[in-house]
Amino acid sequence: MMIPQEILEKIDKNRQRYVEELLGFLRIPSVSTYTRHAQDVRKAAEWVLHHLKRLGLPAQLHETGGHPVVTARSPFQPDLPTLLIYGHYDVQPPEPMEEWITPPFSPSIRDGCVYARGATDDKGQFFTYLKAIEAVLAVTSRLPINVKVLVEGEEEIGSPNLEGFLKRHRTDLKADAVAVSDGSQFSRGVPAITYGLRGLSYFQIDLQGPRIDVHSGSFGGVTANPAQALAQVLAQMKNPDGTVAIPGFYESVVPLEAWERQELAALSFDEGGLKAYLGVDELPGEPGYTVLERKSARPTLDVNGIWGGFQGEGAKTIIPAKAGAKVSMRLVPNQSPSVISALFKQYVESLTPPGVRVTVTELHRAEPVLVSRDCTGIRAAARAIEIGFGKTPVFIREGGSIPIVNVLKEVLEIDSILLMGWGSPDDGPHSPNERLFLEDFHRGVRSAAALLYALAP
């Protein structure tokens, strides 16, 4: 079903008001990881709840073991498909504060963008769906399909309470497709549908040497040094050619198919622009694969942080008692996080030299995702984006992980996962000066409204 032109005109007419309302949402410092912001997180949940009720949708705030979940649903219409809209109202911490040009929770509009924490991840993108619903109801008084809304406040801390919530409310949240807009276009002005996500295995390595820091002059040569042992372990995580050295790591990897490589090669990918954005001269990685293939569809291993020993000004001659690191691996189909976890722990233990004790702790995991591009929902999403952006979307695989996607897929048994990012790749989610182009926000509202009609029979 095609979206009535009157709805698109209504969206165009109200675009400035939509932005002003978004600014109010962005002013709430809903940083879920900080306990000092617990009331702000609740305030954001109540803001969403109030907005949903203003649209005329029965909405409810649900308590969890952490931050609240907000749900809503349109009046049920038999024989029509149901779309579940997922979003999150919590945001990442804004630090380092000194790198923000304007305060992170005082939204600023400049250069055609709104700058604020949460602008693109995920308040701005989620809010497009609320404005789309508003526009449709203002013109027609009923939605062309059944709609359910699920908004959480713990996505940025791993959604610890959402899986249990979904299991308890499985029947209420049953749907034919789920829309997730928590990503980006392929490049500025090139809209995309993501059909693959890499999974994640994230670990902390802790090495313990002597019971306390000791004098390196008195004990050097007789005491194992945890910092040096850690360096040895981490150095052996990769082979000289950049591949991961863990035995068995690549055993279950599903190779990229020929048609995927052809489609990726056909995309207009600016390697020079990526170098400039990163401020680097080279883009090294696994031999035999293009930068775009390595960036989105091949498994990786990265050290995310290292600590241990004296790091203050001047000198302090010690052998540290402890050292540690965070290590993450991005996984592709059919790499299982549980299998990779066992391989990683075994490998680290085998590399750890005598004289130090090692503890390997798994912090996060997410299964890789691959969605069929031939399902009804994906085809509808493509038609909707073409209306909203005026361009046919490209199909991409994303290098990052969205753990909630797997939870939605497995717990609610929804296979039609519509991953449509309205933002630009350089919007800077999780970084200082996070932004969202206002034109992308507007196109997202148009696309979200068109999706409701594209899914209708």
Image: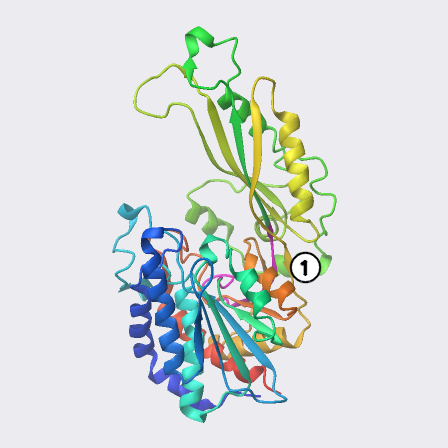
Bounds of the magenta span? Answer: 183-199
| Residue shown at the point (62%, 31%) measured from the top left | 348
- Picture layout, residue 452 above or below residue 257: below
Looking at this view, name the residue that lies furthest to the bottom: 140
Query: What residue occupies the far right of the structure in this picture?
Result: 251
* Residue 230 visible in the snapshot: yes
Give the side of residue 23 with respect to residue 63, left or right.
left
User: Mark 1, residues whose alpha carbon is within 10 Å: few (<14), some, or many (≥20)?
Assistant: some
Amino acid at pointer 1: Glu
Residue 387: x, y in percent? 50, 80
Q: Position of residue 45 (x, y in %)?
A: 38, 67
- Tell me where residue 381 appears, x and y as whole percent: 57, 75
Residue 194 lies within the magenta run? yes
The quarter of the picture where residue 90 lies is: bottom left
Residue 250 vertical position relative to residue 144 in the rendered view, above or below: above
Q: Secondary structure at mark 1?
A: helix
Q: The N terminus is located in which quarter?
A: bottom right
Number of dots carrying numbers: 1
Q: Is residue 287 visible?
A: no
- Tell me which residue sits at (44%, 78%) in the image: 59
Residue 442: in magenta span: no
According to the picture, the residue beneath numbered tag 1 turns out to be 260
**244 relative to 425, above or below:** above
Q: In percent of the image, x 32 and y 25: which residue is there?
A: 312
The image quadrant where one finds the C terminus is bottom right
Image position, residue 336 (x, y; %): 68, 49
Depth check: 266 or 93 in front? Answer: 93
